[in-house]
Image (tube, rainbow, N blue to C red):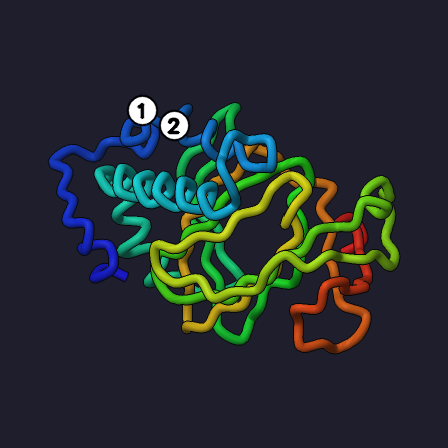
Amino acid sequence: MTAQAQILDFSAPDDISPGMALQGVWQDFANSIAAMGNDSGYGDNDEMCSVLNHNTVLMHKLLMSSATYRNIVNSNFSRLVRTKHWGWRSIYEDELGRVGLFSVYRNAPVPMHDHPGTHGVLMVIEGEVEVERYTLQEQCRNRNESGIVDLDFCERKIIKPFEITWFQEKEGNIHGLKSLSDQCVMLKIQLPRGVNCNRSWYFPTFSTGGGQKVMPARRIMNRFL
């Protein structure tokens, strides 16, 4: 972990807060994430991904000027006692959204889940993770209950350090993660700062190799787990 962080070669004589490190640019970062979508002004999906990747790496570099953030990246996660299937450390949040570090582990995949009404970006800092993204079909979106739903396939890919994946309010909002390393640590930016009390989890109704265009899944509302 330390070696990965030292690539950016930051040193800060004062322990400035992550909020101070992002001062003056957080609004622009939030706007670039909020602009995701077909009517965003981005030329195409590749351009959108390129802009989001650039901005998220830049956010990480700015946060590295905060000794608080560096200590969390270099120490806290590397010595994290694993008591859950994944870990979360909040870094900064306000009315626009929240920033944090998300950690997943080998042999403990995060099941497919959604982030109702929010959109965001995940960037790997250390390790590798396989991400599979789906979109809930239109006719299933108004159902506020558990049951069988159909998911449209978006992508399945391996994310390496300083690469990203993303989710919008509708497109690609459902995703699952599987760490390909002992531990994978990611910077996560989510807008707005929703608590996700209406989150759902999605379990394929039959074993598949992944990647099919439409996948039926059993949706279970978070309140039933």
Which residue is depicted at the point 78% across and 48% down? 223
Along the line of sight, the residue nearer the viewer: 110 or 67: 110
Question: Left or right of 72: which side holds 83?
Answer: right
Along the line of sight, the residue nearer the viewer: 33 or 62: 33
Could you say which quadrant of the image residue 185 lies in?
A: bottom left
Could you say which quadrant of the image residue 147 lies in?
A: bottom right
Q: Mark 1 packing: few (<14 Cα in 10 Å), some, or many (20+)? A: few
Residue type at tag 2 = Trp
Q: Position of residue 176 (x, y in %)?
A: 61, 61
Which residue is depicted at the point 63% across and 50% down? 172
Question: Left or right of 144: which side holds 47?
Answer: left
Residue type at tag 1 = Gln
Under circle 2, the secondary element is helix
- Whether residue 85 can be seen here: no
Q: Position of residue 28 (x, y in %)?
A: 40, 26
Task: State how many labels appear.
Answer: 2
- Whether residue 204 can be seen here: yes
Under circle 1, the secondary element is loop
Q: Quadrant of the N terminus?
A: bottom left
Question: Left or right of 220: which side holds 99?
Answer: left
Q: Quadrant of the C terminus?
A: bottom right
65 shown above or below 30: below
Q: Are marks 2 and 1 in contact (CB under 8 Å)?
A: yes
Q: Which residue is mark 2?
A: 26
Q: Which residue is mark 1?
A: 23
Q: Mark 2 packing: few (<14 Cα in 10 Å), some, or many (20+)? A: some
Residue 162 badge: none
Which residue is depicted at the point 65% across and 68% down? 211
Q: Position of residue 18 (x, y in %)?
A: 32, 34
Question: Left or right of 24: which side holds 199?
Answer: right
Q: Position of residue 39 (x, y in %)?
A: 60, 31
